[in-house]
Image (tube, rainbow, N blue to C red):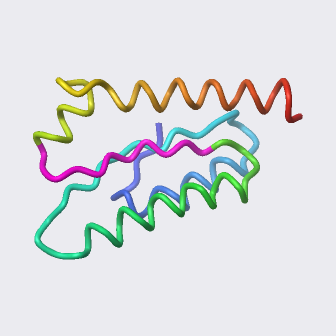
Amino acid sequence: VVSVPGSFEIPVAAQKLGKSGKYDAILCIGAVIRGDTTHYDAVANSAASGVLNAGLSAGVPCVFGVLTCDDMDQALNRAGGKAGNKGAETAITAIEMASLFRHHLA
């Protein structure tokens, strides 16, 4: 587990971890909560495109599991509450992608 200060910083850490050769996949988990400014859109879009670019650059699946939510209740519901567990879904995707890379794309 590697922690970063915020969702905007996830891609650079994912890229570095991916290039280390130590991991078969990188789970990028976080949350961006909408506020009263357009900062939300910039952070969410940058995190999404950055995680994609990290995976392409590193050659290792970097799976985007950053929640983009209107409020904290929605985030909690999507992180194991009433709306399922998006973190678990992200982990399953990472396992599937790591297997695909190992068995079919090596």
Q: Give the image quarter of residue 37.
A: bottom left
Q: Position of residue 103 (x, y in %)?
A: 84, 24
Q: Position of residue 68 (x, y in %)?
A: 29, 51
Residue 19 is inside the magenta segment:
no
Q: Is residue 72 depicted above or below 52 in this figure?
A: above
Number of marks drawn: 0
Q: Position of residue 6 (x, y in %)?
A: 34, 58
Q: Is residue 63 depicted above or below 9 in this figure?
A: above
Instruction: Farthest residue to the bottom: give it.
Output: 38
Residue drawn at (41%, 24%) of the image: 88
Instruction: Farthest residue to the front: give it.
Output: 83
Residue 64 is inside the magenta segment:
yes
Q: Position of residue 106 (x, y in %)?
A: 89, 34
Q: Is residue 6 depicted above or below 99 in this figure?
A: below
Classified by dominant secondary structure, the portion drawn in magenta counts as strand
Residue drawn at (18%, 35%) of the image: 76
From which residue to which does the magenta span run? 62-72
Q: Give the image quarter of residue 86.
A: top left
Residue drawn at (37%, 57%) of the image: 7
Instruction: Farthest residue to the right: give it.
Output: 106
Residue drawn at (61%, 24%) of the image: 95
